[in-house]
Amino acid sequence: ETRRISVPELTAYKGQKKIAALTAYSAPIARLLDPHLDMILVGDSTAMVGYGMPDTLAITPAMMTAHAKAVVDSTRRVCVVVDMPFGSYQESPERAFRQAAGMMAGSGVQAVKIEGTATLAPTTRFMVERGIPVLAHVGLMPQYMNVMGGFKAQGFNEEVAERIVQDAIAHQDAGAFAVVLEGITEALGRRITETLSIPTIGIGASPACDGQILVTEDILGLSGPRIPKFAKQYADIGAAISNAVAQYASEVREGSFPGLEHCFGVKKG
Ligand code: KIV
Ligand code: NA
């Protein structure tokens, strides 16, 4: 019987081995990822990838909890982390704790992720000291797109870069077990990784990061013809699905599916 990789084990990877992580929102994908990864994030990117919403703002704690439960129930090895959705944690540490505790109890995930500058570090501390491991997310933060003016890579300007370094340090000092660095320059990703004693997990950050994460649909050809610059397509499952469905539809239309072998009450031979 295998045991799940724990949150402290992931932190201890720093300087030892890279953290390989991807997103999953559903049982079939999570089951396929489990043997190969250290961590699965049930990302609020499912708002866009899974529901076709224009951004991540409208997904709810109940929706995220349902996806997280599907992922936990269909995995045995990986550490599973869920994204807290927009509006569920920014207001106060107390409200964040209550929402996170409900999401953990409802799904069985081991940790939550929150996006935020140093302003949110007291929330990280409040949750960690009360039993909820926190993965912090700094740099490009999709939940803040309306303040930032879209999804733009960060850290080209030294003032902004320095602020992002301070954001990462603040969450580390508040007890975060690792930090996701999204959409920042290579130099800044490297600098934060060298500065922190906890692992950095990059998405469009730097190969120097202590781990990497991507949206699974982006690497499998399931998120449309255009993928972000930081993603790499490893397979074209989208094309495989298209071909299979086209063949099924044409067999239905020409009457070659179902065959007698798919029917009940028909004797063989
Ligand atoms: O929602 C998400 O998928 C994320 C990333 C870090 C991949 O937050
Ligand atoms: Na997210």
Image (cartoon, rainbow, N blue to C red):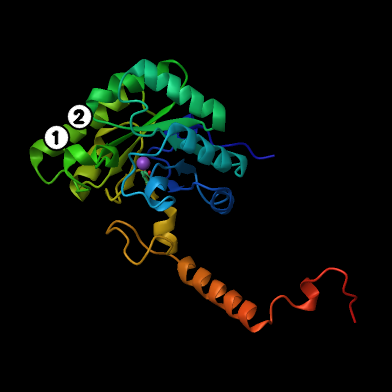
Residue that lies at the very extreme toward the bottom in this rendered image: 254
Nearest the camera: 42 or 38? Answer: 42
Residue 227 quadrant: bottom left
Circle 2 residue: 166
Position in image of residue 259 (x %, y %): 75, 78
Instruction: Give the side of residue 140 with respect to residue 10, left or right.
Output: left
User: Which part of the image, by quadrant, shows the C terminus?
Assistant: bottom right
Query: Label 2 sits on what residue type?
Result: Gln
Count the marks: 2
Left or right? Give the position of 191 relative to 211: left
CA separation in Å, label 1 and label 2 = 6 Å
Residue 175, given in percent of the width and then of the height, sits at 36, 23
Rendering quarter of residue 169: top left
Which residue is drawn at the image coordinates 55% and 43% (left, top)?
71
Specify the quarter for ligand 2.
top left
Residue at coordinates 69% horizontally, 77% vertically from top-left?
Answer: 257
Tag 1–tag 2 contact (CB < 8 Å): yes
**On the image, which quarter does residue 85 sit in?**
top left
Tell me what residue is drawn at x 41 percent, y 16 percent. 129
Which secondary structure, mark 2? helix
The residue beneath circle 1 is 162
43 w.r.t. 167: above or below: below
From the viewer's perspective, tell me whether residue 36 is left or right of residue 168: right
Q: Quadrant of the N terminus?
A: top right
- Which residue is depicted at the point 36% across and 61% down? 232
Say if 21 sits above or below 108 in the image. Answer: below
Assign a secondary structure to mark 1.
helix
Q: Is residue 18 visible?
A: no
Image position of 117 with respect to 251: above or below: above
Residue 153 in sight from this viewpoint? yes
Looking at the picture, tell me which residue is in the foreground, 192 or 39: 39
Badge 2: few (under 14), some or many (20 or more) residues near its Cα, within 10 Å?
some
